[in-house]
Image (cartoon, helix red, strand yellow):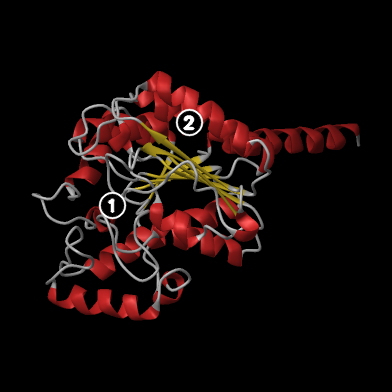
Amino acid sequence: MTILIYTGINTYLCKRQQILSIMKQTPSTCVYLGTNLASYGFGNNHPFGPQRHNSFSTALRDLQLDQQLCLREPVSTNRQIIELFHEPDYVDRVIEQSKTGSGYLDYGDTPAFKGVYEATCYVVGSVIDAIDQLLKHEFKHAFVPIAGLHHARRDSAAGFCVFNDCGIAIEYLKTQKLKQILYVDIDAHHGDGVFYAFEDDPAVIFADIHESGQYLYPGTGHSSETGRGEATGLKLNIPMKPGSTDNDFLIAWQQLEKFVSQFKPEFILLQCGVDSMAGDPITHLKYSAQSHAFATQALINIANLHCEGKLLVMGGGGYNHQNIALGWTTVVQTLIDQSG
């Protein structure tokens, strides 16, 4: 009898150790990569071209980061999800121009191309799938490089952005009964499509550090814009002067973190555009990848404190391919290092 009991306990301990070992080996970070994501771009001669995805993908594998996380294929979505944020008439227009590939979807920045609807469905679908994975606790962190299309309005495209996956993500999270969502944006450009869509929504805590609109598209995001109605005081815009460095970013981040510390978000979204790094061809900020690592680390800490680590990062802008490779892999490395 003693031998049987000992054997049973030993078997249990062995299985428990195997389970713990598997849990330890299971990555806590997932990254979405694939040709369907790379297909969102406006041609090789456009700043937002398919090579952005490939620059990141190559760097990720060269650094062997792909061996420390879970790579997931892009996932498409349906019109019902897109219309959580966008007007049906606008979705109709994108579908029609996607067939012909002619004309612009805004006033001159965002050209249509054949298959643009399907390509954007993969951007949105990957973001929504990432949310589902995090809500199911399959992962703590997720990174979608070709995402963070924060300029698109509910009824139009803008600034290389066809469908606003950030806005759709927020609306989707609200359908999951989340009452407080934190959206942080460190892209050089102000996230105007997100800000104005939720300017009066108290469920969305919005914080954006961006190059001053006095010098850069879209010309919005003044420090006086702090929300409207029930959401007054729940939005923070910090415009930065051209040439701002990592030290300037850290000062701004202290202001952002003091603001965010008032809240207990249930989910955190980060748009980490690397067009705020020095050397971007269309912006004027001078951050290094360390600012992006710092912001990511700080939000991981907040996520661990309030929402079981749930942090979804979207690549956003960036048009210097070396910056894309360095900036995004630095963000991913930070997610991996802090995934325990």
Question: Taking 212 as reference, is 93 above or below it?
Answer: below
Residue 273 shows up from this direction: yes
Q: In which quarter of the image is the N terminus?
A: top right
Q: Quadrant of the C terminus?
A: top right
- Residue at figure coordinates x 84%, y 37% from the top left: 4
Name the kind of residue labelled 1 in the image: Gly
Pointer 2 residue? 295
Mark linked to residue 319 = none
Q: What element carries label 1?
A: loop
Q: In which quarter of the image is residue 185?
A: top left
- Residue at figure coordinates x 28%, y 52% from the top left: 34
- Residue at figure coordinates x 48%, y 28% from the top left: 252
Q: Which of 81 and 280 is in front in this view?
A: 280
Residue 339 x %, y %: 54, 33
Residue 336 shows up from this direction: no
From this viewpoint, which residue is outermost toward the right?
1
Question: Taking 193 as reference, is 26 above or below it?
Answer: above
Pointer 1 residue? 34
Residue 132 x %, y %: 53, 58
Question: Taking 312 as reference, is 323 above or below it?
Answer: above
- Residue at figure coordinates x 24%, y 55% from the top left: 160
Q: How crowded is mark 2: few (under 14 residues within 10 Å), some or many (20 or more)?
A: many
